[in-house]
Amino acid sequence: MQTTDPTNISTKILKRKPRLYLSESFSVDNWNAIEPYFTELVSRDIDSVEALEKWMSDRSELESVLTEDLGWRYIRMTCDTRNEEVTKAFQYFVSEIEPKVAPFDHQLNQKLMSSPYVKELDQEQYRIFLRGVNKALEIFREENIPLQTDISTKQQQYAAITGSMTVTLDGEELTLQRAADRLKQNNREVREEAWRSIQNRRMQDRQKLDDLFDELLRLRDQVARNAGFPNFRDYMFAAMGRFDYTPQDCFDFHESVKETIVPLLTTQDQERKQKLGLAELRPWDLDVDPSGSAPLEPFKSGDELLDKTIQVFYKLDTYLGDCLATMREMGHLDLESRKGKAPGGYNYPLDEIGVPFIFMNATSSLRDVITILHEGGHAVHSFLTRGLRLNAFKHPPSEVAELASMSMELISMDYWDTFFEKEDELRRAKKTHLGTVLETFPWVSTVDKFQHWLYENPQHTQEERHQQWVSIFETYNHLEVGWQGLEQYKPFIWQKQLHIYEVPFYYIEYAMAQLGAIAVWKNFKQNPQEGLAAYKRALSLGYTVSIAEVYEAAGIKFDFSTVYIQSLADFVREEMEKL
């Protein structure tokens, strides 16, 4: 189904394919410029299966142009949350264009599925796409359009609130990301001061963020009930196309993590406490290297981070290196942390050009290296699906998307000497990251279980929400850590997780994909050439097959049973012991 060779690219500036439906000069200025194309698609006569496929391609082209325009508006806004003009441009699209597109999308879905020629389409090629269209038709309600607009606007407020957070340490104003680097310092007083400063700054906006979530909760619950669902969780499982697993599978996963991973991490924390010579672990003791060595500093600037990452990718595979080098040539990266920049990191697919954008908040830490490797895996995925014919084919579900990114973190480890020239630092970096890999599971379980409760109980009070969070948090996270005298901070830790505000229910995928990534890495270690080939082969499928079929193409299983989790956790533990 690949229309072009996915590995045939160069590091020159890439151009979008010639438009076949929209004019080359078309730009998204206002709704009046867009509407005629939707009107034509709705009214066009379709008299053959060939005409239907041409109609689908034209619709896909229009979608690509619109989603890329929205993408650039979002990117510019997150790069500078203080710039009112770029914020207005994003809000204009969300409030004036998206609400008008939604009913046309519904009409086009109806037109597609009611066509007598849909049965003549290659069902193997289109089965996943058509399954998604049918689900979209089931859940569409016109009365939800203004609610979705309101939700999008409020979600943007989270970035504005958190992006403005800074602390002052030793007379220097720092973003929270830069302040968090001090949690790696050997001086325990420095760590404690940084941790308390970060928490106190977050606490200043705790009520504002609680109230914002109340508004989002109310709107999301209404969207779900309008669409005939008992709660927003069930609505989102349908909206996200979760055909391959159920909420009960998630609950079973939470329990499996509690049985298999939490005891393993508790043992590691006990060892950490002993190595640090502490009577009690505290929250500011979790990021420092227990050996007493200085914090790892793998790079000093965003340019150096990018240069070294490109070197790592080239050592892995020429194609992978070309992907990042191309993005650098085209200016599709913004890596360093600065005031006014939204928190977090992302790889934003740009559907028409096919060259994504990486955004992150690098300071000088190992975590930053992991982030760019992670987002670089997403970027490679975008390049591998660039030649797929329909826009919908290029957007696999998160369980597949995160497989791309998390696998890259692990299969690149053989070349981390690019960042860490000293053998002892290289061992520390690898061991630290593998510990973080295991920590993924309890944190994801915490966030996911919390979200299930939030939307199953939409009438809860803020106090009930805080109590539920603390209960779940204390079940899964660092059972050896003492919180005496810090209890006031714990009920609000969830507010730092942007997914809860901006992309609800997008989190369990990280754990599922982490399992898959460990399996990909295991295969890669046994046979690097075939392991990497299977990784690329699976990602190039995009969303033309099911999740399980993508995982199968990668030579792994889509499985999150207790037995499977235990086997992969044991593999990670054994690899850590070798270090």
Image: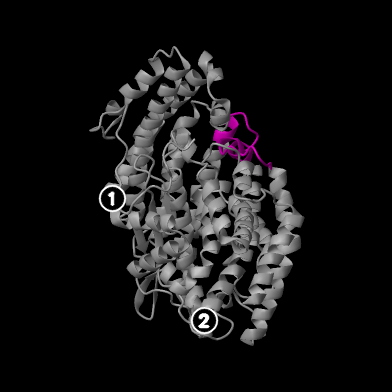
On the picture, is 69 further left or further right than 532?
left
Residue at 40% across / 12% down in the picture? 45
Residue 412 shows in this picture: yes
Q: Quadrant of the C terminus?
A: bottom right
Task: Identify residue for label 2.
Answer: 423
On the picture, is 60 further left or further right than 515?
left
Place residue 418 in its image quadrant. Answer: bottom left
**x, y percent for residue 208:** 47, 55
Task: Identify residue for label 1.
Answer: 13
**x, y percent for residue 550:** 59, 44
Label drawn at residue 252: none
Say whether residue 237 is magenta.
yes
**x, y percent for residue 126:** 54, 29
Say whether residue 513 is magenta.
no
Residue 115 shows in this picture: no
**x, y percent for residue 156:** 41, 48
Highlighted range, magenta: 222-246
SS for tag 1?
A: loop
